[in-house]
Amino acid sequence: MLTVEAKNVDFYYSDFHALKNISLEVEKNKVVAFIGPSGCGKSTFLRILNRMNDLIDGTRMTGSVLIEGEDIYAPNVRVDELRKKVGMVFQKPNPFPKTIFENIAYGLRVNGIKDNSFIEQRVEESLKSAALWDEVKDKLKKSAFALSGGQQQRLCIARALAISPKVVLMDEPASALDPISTAKIEELIYELKKDYTIIIVTHNMQQASRVSDKTAYFYLGELIEYDDTTKIFTNPQKESTQNYITGRFG
Amino acid sequence: MKRFLEKLAEGALLLSGSITSITILLIVLFLFKEASGLFRSPVIEEGYVIALNKANTVKSLSSYEIKEIFDGEISNWAELGGKDEAIEVVRLSDLTNYYTEEELGAEFENIPAKASELTASHPGIVLFLPKQYLAKKFDGITLDKETIHPGDFFGGKEWYPTASPSAQFGLLPLLLGTLWVSLGAILLSLPFGIAVAVYLAEIATMRVRNILKPIIELLAGIPSVVYGFFGLVVLVPFLQKIFQLPVGETALAGSVVLAIMALPTIITVAEDAMRTTPRAMKEASLALGATHWQTIYKVIIPYSKSGITSAAVLGIGRAIGETMAVLMVTGNAAVIPHTLLEPVRTIPATIAAELGEAASGSAHYQALFALGCILFLITMVLSISVEFISKKQK
Ligand SMILES: Nc1ncnc2c1ncn2[C@@H]1O[C@H](COP(=O)(O)OP(=O)(O)OP(=O)(O)O)[C@@H](O)[C@H]1O
Ligand SMILES: [Mg+2]
């Protein structure tokens, strides 16, 4: 069963052609890594998958994207419903200026859930899945800003998990973190793929090879190569991919 | 050479900064100095004296008490803590009721003696007499050293600066008038202003915003007299008709005009605050499946709370100090208002309308300065709170 299915996606920022004819499929409960030099369009493509680019004026897209078989760019699609299904973790931790508890409860509350015991239970479950519960269980009423950067990022992951998405998009989730926090996030991704389909953008080759099942290499708005991670890193088919993963450019 | 020029420029900047501060300080000092004179002014009209029978146990009268006596509101000394004795008000012209014109003399040369005699013989008398008719050896108590008490000003319920024998400088009707009009203005303009700010910051497209924003900023530049004209010609007749009022010049008219005037400030400041909401916050909310509206009231408005508060306070500040437009539409009756549909008079309108006719150095003149001080203190408190709020934001 395919969770994500993009077909012939072209994307423009005003007149800038940022993505060129991208087609890519992601299977359920797999981790896919997007790699490629800065500015090649990884984030742009990621944000197409939860229609985050809708927020930017003057953008245009052609082609189609199906999530669990549904065309997410169809006219009758409710974007807020889509985003409940496709969660996102950003590059820089961006907790709300609220308590730890309220940060996680936010997604449930905007979903119209009022049952407090259910919310409490979901908060605990999400924090446990994000491997943060033990560190924060005694300070749920404290501001989220009192956490370290790594903890804040795991809080943001927990926040995304709380509304039980099908797909979790992560845009360089560990780039602002120290090695220990990064390792924790990687472990977490490994755990999470049991329940979620994960797409992660990263600049870290080791990270891509450690966490992902498949890897997509982007270059100048094009999808150059997309294959099993082991294959990409041991036996890439394209020279451009080879050059990039061996660090000859990018 | 270059270093020298830099030093020179630095010095010039420092100098202009100090001059500005000193000028402002001097203005404030002048304001308070003139105002403080009010509490050294006599209670009784310049050149007159009030005399009582020497057996009277009441030894001093406040400005308000004098007014009440002469208006006939107080008619027994017992009400003022004295003996149970009816009060007998005697003005200069009333002397003919007690004495014939011959007795008073052809040139009124006997008035001093007769006034003294009358005072001595009537235990309940209160005599209001020009100082020139006061006998050398007057047989009674004269009240001429009484000065206006701070209580008469701060607690006074009447503003009647030309009243005789004792002018009334009661702050309350003017202060309440100002507060009512300003409060009404802010209640009208705040919800509307925030709504427009939300629209501009979050909903309007770039094109609409680029058209609307300059128009709104232009509104701030229209002279207040023009708003006053609009209020007088359009709003006042309209309110009169809608509410079936005897007069349309009411506190409400002032509030509406001020609300319109305060809107540009409120909209601009609130919109700027909303725009400072980090993109990351908005994206975090939307990525969790919140709708645009949920993001507005759960993230953007809470995030810009202090900016919105500053907008409100600045709006009130503008409303409280506004003179011309309010003067034109509020009816200017110095009475304590009970509803928004009554005429009121505000502090700035009073100063503007009366300063021209108050003799320089008179109690009335000083009372207007005291009003100025009150206004200054209110706006100072407001701007300090804006400062405080925006500090908290950071
Ligand atoms: N809001 C925008 N408006 C116009 N152009 C944009 C915008 N966002 C991105 N771009 C352009 O689109 C291209 C792809 O950007 P994108 O952010 O997707 O790259 P990326 O692969 O994520 O890079 P990085 O690794 O640095 O994050 C870049 O050339 C960038 O300049
Ligand atoms: Mg990126």
Image: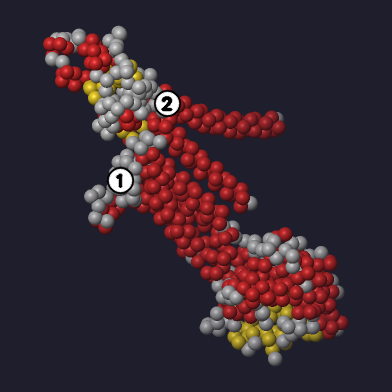
Q: Pointer 1: what residue?
A: B343
Could you tell me residue A22's position as x and y percent? 68, 82
Of mark 1 and mark 2, the one earlier in the sequence is 2
Disc 2 residue crowd, few under 14, some 14–19, many 20+, Cα 10 Å = many
- Is B363 or B330 nearer to us in this picture? B363
Nearest the camera: B55 or B373? B55
**Chain letter for the residue marked with disc 2 in the picture:** B
Q: Chain of mark 1?
A: B
Q: Residues within 10 Å of mark 1 (few under 14, many from 20)?
A: many
Task: Provide the secondary structure element on which disc 2 rests.
Answer: helix
Is B28 positioned to the left or the right of B229 in the image? right
Which label number is shown at residue A25?
Answer: none
What residue is shown with label 2?
Answer: B39
Residue at 49% of width from left, 54% of height from top? B268
Residue visible at 59% across and 72% down in the picture: A109
Quarter holding the N terminus of chain A? bottom right
How far from the left and from the top, in percent, is residue B259? 40, 52
Amino acid at dot 1: Pro
